Amino acid sequence: MAGQKPGLVTGSNAKLSIGGKTLAYATDVSYSVDVSVVPVEVMGSYEVITNEPIATSVRGSFTIVRYTATAANALPQAAKSGNGVGELGKDKTNSVDGQSNAFNPGKMLSTSTVDLEIFQRLATEGSAIGSQSLVKISDCRLTRLSSGLNKRGIMTESYDFVGILYDDESFVAAASRSNTTTDLT
């Protein structure tokens, strides 16, 4: 069936956005959603009559290929200020710090939460490319940073995060949803 484009989400057609800023050179992202339940017991019965949900928690990680502001001029789709931890979570105008001070001991109490979103790039009518939000994890805080560099490789930085609310494009009554956005890069 020539001419048909697959609708599968792949690494080549997905984007990762943190605090409204698309991360260039994100290589991995993973997350898990846990639902805490409590067993409901009644007198006169030895077994639990039901398990009721009481809370959800979201945690995950992502990895980026690290680049500096001086290297950004040679990299297509790269933010001109680099993608170090000091840039994560700043909004497009760099007026909100978000998680940019998450690992700075003197400023970590002044950080705010950021939203993490996974988009699928879509080819629309003509040649314009848009994107559809697939997953949104609200009110994320960065909890861990690790980095790796070897003699023949490139420097990568891995981040762990926790979030409050998980939202998926397949939910009918989504908590917050913007169906289609324009490409940020």
Image (spheres, rainbow, N blue to C red):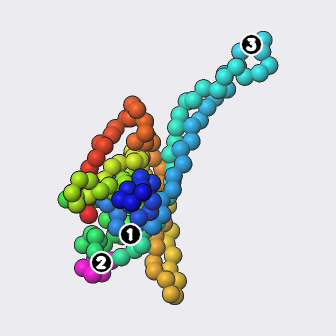
Residue drawn at x 41%, y 47% as measured from the top left = 135
Indicate the amino acid at tag 3.
Met
Residue 73 falls within the magenta-colored stretch: yes
The answer to whether 158 is drawn above or below residue 36 in the figure is below
Residue 146 falls within the magenta-colored stretch: no
Q: Quadrant of the N terminus?
A: bottom left
Residue drawn at x 42%, y 72% as measured from the top left = 65
Query: Could you tell me which secondary element the residue under label 3 belongs to?
Result: loop
* Marks 2 and 1, how far apart at CA: 10 Å
Indicate the amino acid at tag 1.
Tyr
The answer to whether 62 is drawn above or below residue 77 in the figure is above
Residue 68, located in which quarter of the rendered image? bottom left
Residue 24 at x, y percent in the picture: 34, 67
Query: Could you tell me which secondary element the residue under label 1 belongs to?
Result: loop
Query: Could you tell me which secondary element the residue under label 2 belongs to?
Result: loop
**Disc 3 or 2, which lies upstream in sequence?**
3
Whether residue 2 appears in this view of the structure is yes
Q: Nearer the viewer, mark 3 or mark 2?
A: 2
Q: Which residues are magenta?
A: 68-75
Q: Left of 9 or right of it: where is 99?
A: left
* Marks 3 and 2, how far apart at CA: 67 Å
Q: Residues within 10 Å of mark 2 (few under 14, many from 20)?
A: few
Q: Which residue is mark 2?
A: 75
Label 2–label 1 contact, CB within 8 A: yes
Q: Residue furthest top?
A: 44
Q: Nearer the viewer, mark 1 or mark 3?
A: 1
Residue 104, located in which quarter of the rendered image? bottom left
Q: Which residue is mark 1?
A: 25
The answer to whether 117 is drawn above or below residue 77 in the figure is above
Q: Residue furthest bottom?
A: 151
Q: Which mark is residue 43?
A: 3
